[in-house]
Image (tube, grey):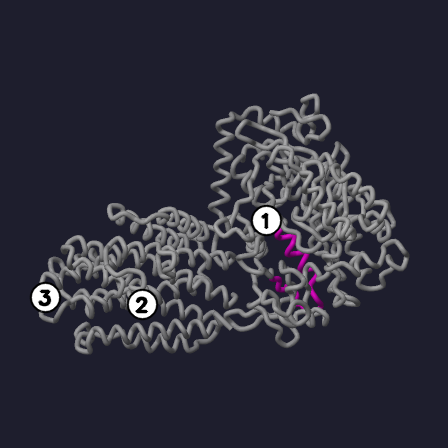
């Protein structure tokens, strides 16, 4: 394979060509495989995904309505010790995020203390005044969080982004593992990998633990989807199926007698916990967007009365904002009283004039992102951008600096992928999934590894042509 | 279970059943057309469209009734919502919408079936490969049904699945019978002629009943015994009596599960009464066409009652 360049950390091989500890057993196995057989496996994987319908939808492309996310067969491997360390940092961060949400919608101590400027959430489109003073059941806001991590060195894991709104991708984490186990059963007998398959059970348990007081001993959980045209519909159906919960659409639901109820063949039946995969603004046409037919008229009244749990709580999208992100180290310290165990990527807030000046002077070296952008849209990657792109972005930045942050172009770690010409290193990130309930924090070992399939590219988003890999956390 | 999902299941299996029966009917039409000379052939193709209820839609697009145009329209025309491909696609969409109601095996059968028919029907089907294509359609539908039998719990979902299958199948059998009687013969003086018996033979074939019929009536071919098989013989899986026994079984299961009967069961009882104890003589005395029209109407009423009673829609 191409040797990794010394500037980037490669997950499998050290610059001298030796195999890193995490990959020792895997590499041993791999070196015994013949390349024709591996190519065949690659083909098998694709037809497996196509047949089982593991697809995502791409908006605005009629004939390519359903697409496969490319899957790569080489796993991304993390040692037990690395994972223990990461987990502690993730747990700390998620607890802080939840406390932060509670504070923002109640006393706002963090603003009074001067640690966070008020304008940050006043200008934040995800901020919901309707949530002020509302206490969600169990005090939980961020039931499910996805923390995007990147690695830049042996001990350098950095948080790139927090996803507290509706993090997606967990179905790929699970299906990638199923696929790997189906294709390489003998590999799993040689290498002990921590299982991920109990995620849906844990999710159901964690959500049930957040049920409102009016719920029965065995709470009714349902997954709310916008429907089959949503890009993550496969995941919604998959999770409902795996949890044994109903997959509902807005038209199935109605507020009757102060409860949110679903239309069954035997009449209406109350729902206790709604894992919604519909955005805030579409959740309740009576409270938010009046034109929306995706949500449930009156659900916010029921929520206010404490008679349904909505996961994640409306308004948690505030935390996904990249300007808030830049304050996360302060936020973690403020609510936990501890130093953050996981660092942020260095971030310049363009709202600040000195930072703006620096960013404008160094556009060609920086990554500039929209504060509310997601999915790799609306960003500038300085080192690979054309002069024209940079000029266009400069104008946007100058017109509305508050809308942007900038970060150095990171040397994201690489992990080998399987290509027609053998293995080749490509940049990866990692999205672990975290569950929070009054009973505690649960982190599934591993997460979703996304990989940029284009040589040298740093963009791993599936909407931008990225792929995924199985992510292994080794057993002790 | 959700009313929307019950609706999706009911219709998913109606579409699969209708796609399969459409292929059967085309096979019979094709056989008639190639055995009877060009001038009559167009009449046979036309009767296929009439049975399917697609004559008006077809005429809006074509002036003639050639085999290639009819097959193209019925099998794959994008602007024909009743084409086999459109129906398979809707069955698959329903399967996607109700993914958590069906097993992975059923989903894979429908998804793979749709993918393979989409490829098969990507271009017009040549006459030389028509039989193969029609067999492939029947096979995909059979696979989905087999996966359903072999992997799904016998619960509420299954009852809606089966109810949809048999409401549709009963409707299709009645229509196929009706079109023979009412439309095909130029005049009553042809009754009993080779033309007449040939057409009955094809009615049997389009319902895969030729073997059952031969077994029951070696050497004979006449309207009454064919009608008897297709309407009254409870052993033949496409007869009206068989379909209604199966429909009853599933509506009974729903009533037990829900602890009550409703208008659907009531209408079902009435429809079944009209069938039970009938002789084929009585049916012919009433007039086969009148009998079938009444049956189709009652069948539709049962379907509507199921939809209302089980809250398919709001």
Q: Nearer the viewer, residue A357 or B220?
A: A357
Q: Which of B63 and B33 is in front in this view?
A: B63
The residue tagged 2 is: B171
Which comes before the other along the chain, label 3 or label 2?
A: 2
The quarter of the image holding the C terminus of chain A is top right
**Which SS class for mark 3?**
loop
For the residues beneath circles 3 and 2, the answer to whether they share a chain is yes
B171 over A319 or under it: above or below: below
Residue B275: image location, x then y, percent: 27, 74
Chain assignment, label 2:
B
* Residue A204 painted magenta: yes
Q: In the figure, is residue A300 to the left or right of B155?
A: right
Residue A437: image location, x then y, percent: 72, 56
Point out the stretch of residues depicted in magenta.
A200-222
The quarter of the image holding the N terminus of chain A is top right
**Which SS class for mark 2?**
helix
Checking the image for residue A171, the label placed there is 1
The residue tagged 3 is: B192
Chain assignment, label 1:
A
Q: How far apart are the alpha carbons under marks 3 and 1?
A: 64 Å
* Residue B224 painted magenta: no
């Amino acid at each position: 394979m191409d040797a990794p360049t010394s500037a980037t950390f490669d997950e499998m091989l050290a610059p001298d060509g030796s195999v890193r500890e995490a990959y020792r057993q895997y590499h041993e196995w791999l070196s015994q495989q013949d390349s024709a057989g591996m190519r065949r496996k690659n083909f098998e994987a694709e037809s497996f995904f196509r047949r089982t319908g593991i697809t995502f939808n791409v908006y605005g492309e009629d004939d390519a309505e359903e697409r496969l996310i490319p899957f790569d067969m080489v796993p991304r491997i993390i040692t037990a010790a690395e994972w223990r360390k990461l987990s502690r940092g993730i747990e700390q961060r998620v607890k802080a995020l939840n406390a932060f949400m509670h504070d923002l919608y109640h006393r706002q101590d963090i603003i009074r203390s001067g640690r966070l400027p008020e304008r940050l959430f006043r200008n934040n489109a995800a901020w919901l005044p309707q949530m002020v003073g509302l206490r969600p059941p169990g005090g939980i806001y961020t039931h499910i969080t996805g923390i995007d991590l990147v690695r830049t060195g042996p001990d350098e894991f950095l948080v790139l982004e927090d996803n507290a709104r509706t993090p997606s991708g967990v179905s790929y984490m699970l299906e990638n593992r199923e696929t790997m186990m189906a294709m390489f059963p003998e590999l799993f007998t040689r290498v002990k990998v921590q299982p991920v398959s109990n995620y849906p059970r844990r999710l159901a348990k964690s959500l049930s633990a957040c049920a409102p007081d009016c719920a029965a001993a065995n709470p009714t959980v349902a997954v709310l989807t916008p429907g089959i045209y949503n890009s993550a519909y496969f995941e919604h159906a998959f999770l409902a199926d795996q949890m044994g919960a109903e997959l509902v659409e807005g038209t199935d639901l109605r507020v009757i007698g102060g409860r949110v109820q679903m239309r069954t063949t035997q009449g209406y039946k109350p729902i206790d916990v709604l894992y919604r995969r519909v955005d805030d603004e579409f959740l309740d046409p009576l409270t938010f967007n009046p034109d929306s037919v995706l949500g449930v008229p009156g659900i916010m009244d029921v929520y206010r009365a404490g008679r349904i749990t909505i996961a994640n709580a409306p308004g948690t999208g505030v935390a996904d904002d990249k300007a808030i992100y830049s304050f996360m180290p302060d936020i973690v310290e403020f609510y936990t009283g501890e130093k953050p165990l996981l660092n942020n990527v260095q971030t310049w807030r363009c709202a600040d004039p000195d930072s703006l000046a620096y960013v404008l002077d160094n556009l060609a070296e920086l990554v500039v992102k929209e504060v509310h952008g997601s999915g790799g849209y609306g960003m500038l990657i300085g080192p690979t951008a054309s002069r024209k792109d940079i000029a266009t972005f400069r104008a946007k930045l100058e017109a509305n600096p508050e809308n942007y942050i900038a970060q150095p172009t990171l040397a994201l770690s690489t992990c080998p992928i399987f290509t027609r010409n053998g293995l080749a290193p490509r940049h990866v990130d990692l999205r672990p999934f975290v569950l929070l309930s009054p009973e505690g924090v649960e982190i599934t070992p591993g997460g979703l590894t996304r990989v940029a399939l284009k040589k040298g590219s740093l963009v791993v988003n599936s909407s931008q042509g990225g792929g995924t890999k199985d992510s292994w956390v080794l057993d002790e | 279970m959700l009313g929307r999902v019950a609706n999706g299941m009911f219709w998913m299996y109606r579409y699969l059943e209708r796609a399969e029966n459409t292929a059967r009917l085309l096979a019979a039409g094709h056989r008639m057309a190639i055995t009877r000379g060009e001038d009559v052939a167009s009449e046979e193709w036309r009767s296929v469209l009439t049975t399917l209820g697609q004559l008006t839609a077809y005429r809006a697009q074509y002036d003639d009734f050639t085999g290639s145009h009819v097959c193209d329209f019925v099998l794959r025309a994008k602007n024909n919502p009743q084409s086999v491909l459109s129906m398979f696609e809707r069955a698959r969409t329903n399967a996607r919408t109700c993914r958590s109601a069906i097993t992975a095996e059923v989903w894979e059968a429908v998804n793979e079936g749709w993918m393979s028919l989409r490829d098969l029907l990507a271009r017009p089907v040549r006459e030389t490969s028509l039989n193969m294509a029609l067999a492939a359609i029947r096979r995909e539908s059979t696979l989905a049904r087999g996966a359903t039998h072999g992997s799904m719990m016998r619960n509420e979902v299954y009852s809606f699945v089966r109810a949809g299958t048999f409401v549709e199948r009963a409707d299709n059998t009645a229509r196929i019978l009706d079109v023979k009687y009412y439309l095909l013969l130029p005049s009553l003086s042809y009754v009993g002629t080779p033309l007449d018996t040939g057409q009955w033979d094809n009615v049997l074939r389009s319902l895969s009943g030729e073997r059952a019929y031969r077994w029951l009536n070696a050497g004979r071919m006449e309207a009454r015994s064919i009608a008897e098989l297709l309407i009254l013989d409870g052993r033949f899986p496409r007869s009206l009596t068989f379909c209604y026994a199966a429909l009853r079984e599933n509506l009974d299961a729903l009533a037990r599960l829900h602890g009550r009967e409703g208008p659907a069961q009531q209408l079902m009882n009435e429809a079944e009464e009209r069938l039970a104890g009938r002789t084929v003589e009585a049916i012919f005395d009433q007039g086969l066409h009148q009998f079938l029209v009444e049956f189709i109407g009652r069948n539709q009423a049962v379907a509507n009652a199921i939809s209302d009673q089980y809250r398919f829609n709001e």
